[in-house]
Image (cartoon, rainbow, N blue to C red):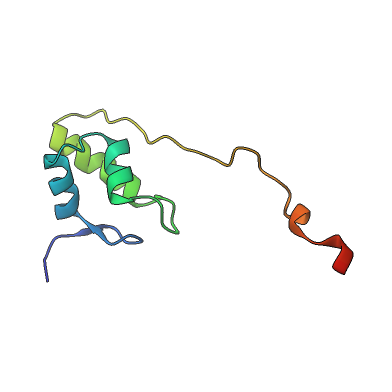
Amino acid sequence: MSNTPIICRCEDITLDEIEEAYKNGFTDIESLRRFLKIGVGPCQGKTCIPLLQKILANLKKSQKIENITLRPPENPIPFGCLINKENK
């Protein structure tokens, strides 16, 4: 077993995997997130996205890293709309 830290616990993504993806051309936060599926687990990126931003800043030797694009539901609906009212 490798001693590399796990960055995304939901998707089990390690630091080595992030660094390898960066070397293979995934050099911005959106492409890394999409390729590695970081931030799509139950936590929705609450812990791993800030870590990914720090790692990417270190790899790019830059202090400023862009944020991810948030995509909320297009048209949220009330939960009650999903209930079959005829079977009450």
Residue placed at 25% from the left, 34% from the top? 28
Residue placed at 74% from the left, 57% from the top? 82
- Tell me if residue 22 comes above or below residue 16 in the rendering: above
Quadrant containing the C terminus in the rendered view? bottom right
Q: Position of residue 75 (x, y in %)?
A: 65, 39
Quadrant containing the N terminus in the rendered view? bottom left
Residue located farthest toward the front when viewing the structure as drawn = 86
Q: For this rendering, which residue is in front, 53 or 30?
A: 30
The answer to whether residue 37 is left or right of residue 57 is right
Q: Position of residue 21 (x, y in %)?
A: 17, 45
Q: Which image quadrant is residue 12 in?
A: bottom left
Residue placed at 18% from the left, 29% from the top? 62
Residue placed at 33% from the left, 50% from the top? 38
Q: For this rendering, which residue is in front, 67 or 75?
A: 75
Residue located farthest toward the bottom when viewing the structure as drawn = 1
- Tell me if residue 84 comes above or below residue 15 in the rendering: below
Q: Position of residue 27 (x, y in %)?
A: 20, 35
Q: For this rendering, which residue is in front, 74 or 54?
A: 74
Q: For this rendering, which residue is in front, 16 or 31?
A: 31
Disc tally is 0
Q: Position of residue 61 (x, y in %)?
A: 13, 31
